[in-house]
Image: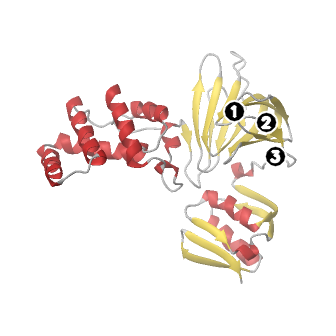
């Protein structure tokens, strides 16, 4: 993650910009207030630049959890804020639109604090310092916390696949943290995906130790198994491990209901992707390419005699022919 360095602004100018933002946001500004603000804004370039930065930061941090917002502000070159300014801004951003970051089409806060991330439709892999290989699926974000005692990857968003490195020198444990708990690699290859209610683990090789966040019993997941990790419970699922074929640009479907398949394909593109409820349960099988979702949709429509409706490239619906 990188930001282009911008000129530093005097602390008093930043204070003035924050004060104006608070006055215009929290109070019902009258005509005299707006006129005074316009005069201040026009007074010099530093005022205009400070106001622009405050507005930009507000859009990026509205609704961001306070501790992560504070850490992120500290990392941004354009911020250069003192502690008191940071906390005043956090209160302001909450007023500007708490929860706004959750919109899928906006850049999520997780990417702002991540060391590795992918956009919608993008898949990437990296070789970490310890020799481990990290793969990220579409719209995912991971923060790295490697130190003398452990190798920790914090899965903030989306889905990862990890092939553990040996790290023979220090023997630090390799762990993945999610909002639901901790997963410790025991010489392994595995995938973790954040779901709405829990994290889903699939183990391809070796074993993984699962520890729920709120102190439930730990468990060991072994190769060929899939597990659900909630904040209070880790439980084995009857289904085989989720496929990691996305690493090769493929989505494998075996008698998968059409609505579920479209939901998966929708993770790799912007906009709405759906179908008529009458065909939602239509079973679909195949190996589908993820690099051109529109071509994949045309293929599915032709193969199953369906009709493809496109209001725009951002709204597509399948129905019976």
Residue named by callout 3: 241
Q: Is residue 82 visible to the viewer in this orientation of the structure?
A: no
Observer-nearest of 193 and 204: 193
Judge from the rendering whether residue 171 lies leftward or rightward of residue 57; answer left or right.
Answer: right
Q: Distance between the residues labelled 3 and 2?
A: 15 Å
Q: Distance between the residues labelled 2 and 1?
A: 9 Å
Q: What element carries label 2?
A: strand
Judge from the rendering whether residue 223 lies leftward or rightward of residue 72; answer left or right.
Answer: right
- The residue depicted at 41 percent of the width and 45 percent of the height is 60
The answer to which of marks 1 and 3 sits earlier in the sequence is 1
Do tag 2 and tag 1 residues touch (Cβ < 8 Å)?
A: yes
Residue 122 coordinates in the image, percent (x, y): 59, 52
Residue named by callout 1: 181
- Figure coloring: secondary structure
Q: Closer to the camera: disc 1 or disc 3?
A: 1
Q: Is mark 1 on a helix, strand or loop?
A: strand
Q: Is residue 311 above or below residue 41?
A: below
Q: Is residue 195 above or below residue 183?
A: below
Q: What element carries label 3?
A: loop
């Amino acid at each position: 993650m990188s930001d282009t360095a911008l000129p530093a602004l005097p602390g008093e100018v930043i204070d003035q910009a924050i004060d104006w933002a608070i006055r215009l946001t929290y109070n019902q500004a009258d005509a005299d207030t707006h006129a005074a603000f316009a005069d201040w804004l026009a007074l010099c370039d530093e005022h205009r630049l400070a106001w622009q930065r405050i507005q930009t930061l507000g859009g990026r941090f509205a609704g961001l959890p306070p501790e992560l917002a504070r850490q992120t502000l500290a990392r941004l070159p354009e911020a250069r804020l003192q502690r008191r300014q940071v906390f005043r801004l956090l209160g302001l951003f909450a007023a500007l639109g708490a929860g706004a970051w959750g919109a899928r089409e906006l850049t999520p806060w997780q990417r702002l604090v991540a060391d590795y991330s992918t956009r919608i439709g993008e898949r990437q892999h990296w070789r970490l310092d310890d020799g481990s290989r990290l793969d990220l699926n579409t719209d995912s974000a991971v923060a790295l916390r490697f130190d003398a005692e452990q190798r920790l990857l914090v899965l903030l968003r989306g889905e990862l696949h990890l092939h553990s490195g040996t790290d023979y020198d220090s023997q630090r444990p390799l762990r993945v943290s999610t909002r639901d708990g901790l997963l410790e690699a025991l010489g392994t290859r595995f995938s973790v995906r954040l779901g709405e209610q829990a994290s889903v683990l699939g183990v391809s090789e070796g074993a993984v130790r699962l520890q729920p966040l709120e102190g439930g019993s730990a468990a060991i997941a072994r190769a060929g198994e899939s597990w659900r990790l909630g904040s209070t419970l880790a439980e084995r699922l009857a289904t085989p491990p989720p496929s990691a074929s996305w690493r090769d640009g493929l989505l494998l479907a075996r008698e998968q209901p059409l609505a579920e398949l479209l939901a998966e394909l929708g993770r790799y593109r912007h906009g709405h992707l759906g179908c008529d409820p009458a065909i939602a349960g239509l079973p679909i099988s195949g190996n589908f390419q993820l690099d051109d979702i529109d071509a994949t949709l045309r293929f599915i429509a032709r193969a199953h005699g369906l009709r493809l409706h496109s209001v725009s490239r951002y709204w597509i619906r399948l129905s019976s022919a």
